[in-house]
Amino acid sequence: MAAESVPPPAVTRRPLAWSTPLTYALALAVAAVSIAPVIYVIVGGFRTTPQIIADPAGLPDPWVWDNYVRVLTQSDFWKQAFNSAVIALGTTAGVVVLGVCAAFVLARYTFRGREGLYTFFTLGLLFPSGAAILPLYLMLRDLTLINSYYAVILPQIAFSLPLTIVILRPFLSAVPRELEDAAAIDGAGRLGFLWRIMLPLSRPALVTVGVLAFVASWNAFLLPLLVLGDADLHTLPLGVQNFSSQYTSDTAGILAFTSLAMLPALLFFTFAEKQIVGGLQGAVKG
């Protein structure tokens, strides 16, 4: 007797929750609000000022390259780009090195007051940097650091360390103790364990804090404005202000200068986006 064929189980489709389309709609709206100004600034640099005045929301017709060429051929732009790069890279290196050292101690060492010290660092997230501008300026003046790269790099490292430690500590704490014991058996000390095992495993977090520190330093305006009185040390955000003051009526040129000034940080952030997401997710899980 032939075996009876069993019909496949019916597939039940779950109805789409009403909140899912709403979530996507809100996400698209937020993305549009965030991206639209950037696109407007970049595209506006390919127009002329009369075109912008006649139709502020229009597209270039024809596309004009003179604004970008004029900005790139100015010596001040490249000088300011060099100053921004030096300050941003110096800040990033200091934040990553000091942040790793502090987070490693707070994650792998047990001592009295450890959690209190970690809480002290996290409270730094609640302290607005603008509130410390005046005493910070007086301190830098007494240390004769005004009009130098250090006047910007050192305070930016200090203000970036709380977030850096909050992100790095969960990663360093998540590494199993068995790996540390195995490294000790193989003859690796604390620093060898940190360099050979901890840092490679914490790469997403290191990239995250590095990118965040670089972008924040590149876009900094208030601190360089106060401590960099020498025009030869001005960064690109200060260059945008100087260019806007010098060419008040040249709206298209100002948009071209602004788009070129923000382009390096924007590209840097875009290329490291996946690493940033992974690093923040690991910090939240930890």
Image (cartoon, grey):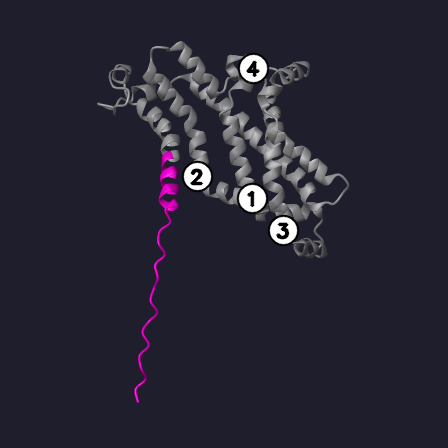
Q: Distance of mark 4 from mark 2, alpha carbons?
A: 32 Å
| Crowding at mark 2 (Cα within 10 Å: few <14, some 14-19, many 20+) | few
Instruction: Label 3: state its secondary structure.
Output: loop
Task: State the residue at coordinates (42%, 10%).
Answer: 245
User: Is residue 7 found inside the magenta-colored segment of the image?
Assistant: yes
Task: State the residue at coordinates (72%, 45%).
Answer: 109
| Crowding at mark 1 (Cα within 10 Å: few <14, some 14-19, many 20+) | few
Q: Distance of mark 3 from mark 1, alpha carbons?
A: 15 Å
Q: Nearer the viewer, mark 1 or mark 4?
A: 1
Quarter residue 266 falls in:
top left
Q: Quickly name the residue at label 4.
A: 226
Do residues under tags 3 and 2 come within 8 Å of each other at their CB atoms?
A: no
Q: Is residue 114 left or right of residue 20?
A: right
> Which labelled disc corresponds to residue 271?
2
Q: Quickly name the residue at label 1.
A: 284
Do residues under tags 4 and 2 come within 8 Å of each other at their CB atoms?
A: no
Quadrant in which the N terminus appears: bottom left
